[in-house]
Amino acid sequence: MHRQFALVLMVVLLASPAVAEDLYKGGNWPSLASDRKADAVGDIITVLVAENNTASNSVGRGSKKQSSISGQIAASSSFGESAGLTFGGGYNGEGSNSRADRMVAQLSATVTQIYPNGDLQITGWQRLKINGEMTNIKVSGRVRPDDINGQNAVLSSRIADANIEYDGRGFASRGAKPGIVTQIFSWLGLL
């Protein structure tokens, strides 16, 4: 019995201490009651683009100028000659410009940078081809983590330094562009 006790004591003293790692890693296990939001470089976030812009401008200008020259020639004979000449001109010009834009889209963007205060720099683009029309939507800007909703989405109106580009090419775009003759007359100021 004494021998068994000594053997167990020797095994315990010679054994190295066991090292265990923690199974819980805070960055990998989100709370069960919360939704996952983008918070690291490479994460994806949904951008809801809903922009309504309206602008108008009007200008009125006018001027009037009139010059008159008259003269008379008389001779000692029975007929007298007289002449008159009047110059005049006037200009009334008005111009107005009105524009209303509306854009609604949804696209994904990637977190490309995290600022020291926790803000996220995002960049994303989407290309669509519908009936021969190629449409490109690009978005980039700075997002506060508080502005990201529970579905990991942010409204475009909540993006700081937002750069939103919408560009399309195809049959409809070419049809909306003025022709070469119209462009020349416009350049000459005739239109």
Image (spheres, grey):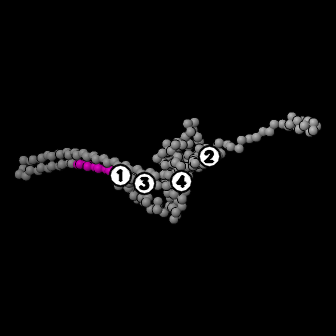
Question: Pointers 2 and 4 in contact (CB under 8 A)?
Answer: no
Query: Residue 166: x, y in percent?
Result: 49, 53
Front residue of 45 and 151: 151
The amino acid sitting under disc 1 is: Ser
Q: In the rendered image, which residue does mark 4 sit on?
A: 107
Front residue of 16 and 94: 16
Q: In the rendered image, which residue does mark 3 sit on?
A: 102
- Distance, label 2 to label 4, CA atoms, is 25 Å
Q: In the rendered image, which residue does mark 1 sit on?
A: 98
Which span is picked out in magenta?
Answer: 89-98
- Distance, label 3 to label 1, CA atoms, is 14 Å
Question: Pointers 1 and 2 in contact (CB under 8 A)?
Answer: no
User: Is 136 in the magenta?
Assistant: no
Q: In the rendered image, which residue does mark 2 sit on?
A: 30
- Which is more foreground, mark 3 or mark 1? 3
Residue at 56 percent across and 42 percent down: it is 120
Mark 3 surroundings: few (<14), some (14-19) or many (≥20) residues within 10 A: few
Looking at the image, tell me whether mark 4 or mark 1 is earlier in sequence order: 1
Looking at the image, tell me whether mark 2 or mark 4 is earlier in sequence order: 2
Query: Residue 105: x, y in percent?
Result: 49, 55
- Which is more foreground, mark 1 or mark 2? 2
Query: Residue 91: x, y in percent?
Result: 25, 49
Query: Residue 74: x, y in percent?
Result: 9, 47
Task: Inspect this view and state whether residue 134 appears.
Answer: yes
Q: Could you tell me which secondary element the residue under label 1 belongs to? A: strand
Residue at 54 percent across and 59 percent down: it is 128
The amino acid sitting under disc 2 is: Pro
